[in-house]
Structure formats: structure tokens, C-alpha cells
Amino acid sequence: MKPGLQTRLSCAAWICALAMSAPTGVYADDVHERQLDQRIQELQQRIDAQARRIDQLESLMRASGASAPAWSGKPPSPAETAPWLTASNWDLIRPGMIHDQVTAILGEPNNERPGEAGATMLLYALEVQEGVFLAGRVELTDGKVSAVQKPALR
């Protein structure tokens, strides 16, 4: 065997041995660090979403003229929430009701817009998470309820 080739082979063997003896914990630490970074990003996104929800709720309260209640550690009672957020109120909406009857039960809609064939859509919506909305609607044809799409409430 040529001396130069033998030197190259021994160097290659030495490099392979060195690579094989490298601690596997270094790779595991990198993976663990990436997982932690990803988890931190997920938590930051949740915090941002919660902050947006709090801002929305505060702006809804300001718009309704209500003052912020002192925190009691309990969720608000149904009487303290918007009427359309109560599932049983949607069950009271019947075909043939007029606009004023609907708003007396569900409250004022977030938006009112024209629908198909001269209908009017009363839209109720709340962003519960970034890009995720809780929404319901009431369709009025000739001034009377013709269709109801209830929101999925929990």
C-alpha cells in the first residue's frame, strides 16, 4: 500500500471514530431546545389571543356603557352577558317575528345587511380567538323572521 493512501485511510478512520464517539446528548439537547422554543412560541400566541379577547370584551363593555365589574373570581352570570350569547334566547326566535321582537330577545345585532331577494340579515358575532368567530344570524323577509342560524354556544 502506498504511504500517502495509508495516511489518508488512517485519517479517515480517526475522523469516523471521533464522530462516532461524539456525545449523543448534544443532538438531544438541540432537539429539546427546539421543542422548548416551539412551545414558547405557542404560549406567546395564546397570550396574544387572550389579550385580543380581553381588548374586545373591554371595548364591548365601553360601547354598551357598562363599567368594569370588580373581579369576583367567578364567571359572569348569564344576565351580565350579551343576550345573544345565551343559547336559550335563540330558541325563542320564531318565524314571523318582526325586527323589534328579535332585538328585544337577542339585543342589537353587530351588523345588519341586505340579503338575497330583499331580505335583511341580522348578524351577531364575537371573535373568540384569532380568526375564530362565534356567529349567528337571523334572516328577515318582508320584515319578518324567515330563517335562523343559531351560533354554536357552550
Image (cartoon, helix red, strand yellow):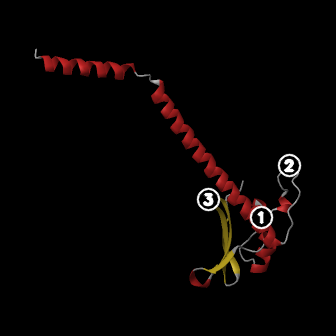
Q: Mark 2 or mark 1: name the one nearer the start of the chain.
A: 1
How far separated are the C-alphas under marks 3 and 2? 25 Å
The amino acid at mark 3 is Glu
Q: Nearer the viewer, residue 39 or 125?
A: 39
Q: Answer yes or no: is residue 98 visible.
A: no
Q: Does residue 13 appear anywhere in the picture?
A: yes
SS type, badge 2: loop
Which badge, 1 or 3, is on the more N-terminal residue?
1
Q: How far is mark 2 from mark 1, CA to CA?
A: 17 Å
Amino acid residing under circle 1: Glu
Q: Residues within 10 Å of mark 3 (few under 14, many from 20)?
A: few
For disc 3, the marked residue is: 130
| Amino acid found under the numbered disc labelled 2 | Gly
Cα separation, mark 1 vs mark 3, equals 16 Å
Q: Would you name the residue on which mark 2 appears? A: 73
Left or right, 27 with reference to 151: left
The residue tagged 1 is 58
Report which quarter residue 65 is drawn in.
bottom right
Q: Is residue 86 left or right of residue 146?
A: right
Look at 61% across and 51% down and name the residue there: 45
Within 10 Å of disc 2 (Cα), the crowding (few <14, some 14-19, many 20+) is few
Residue 68 picture quarter: bottom right
**Residue 133 in the image: x percent, y percent?**
63, 62
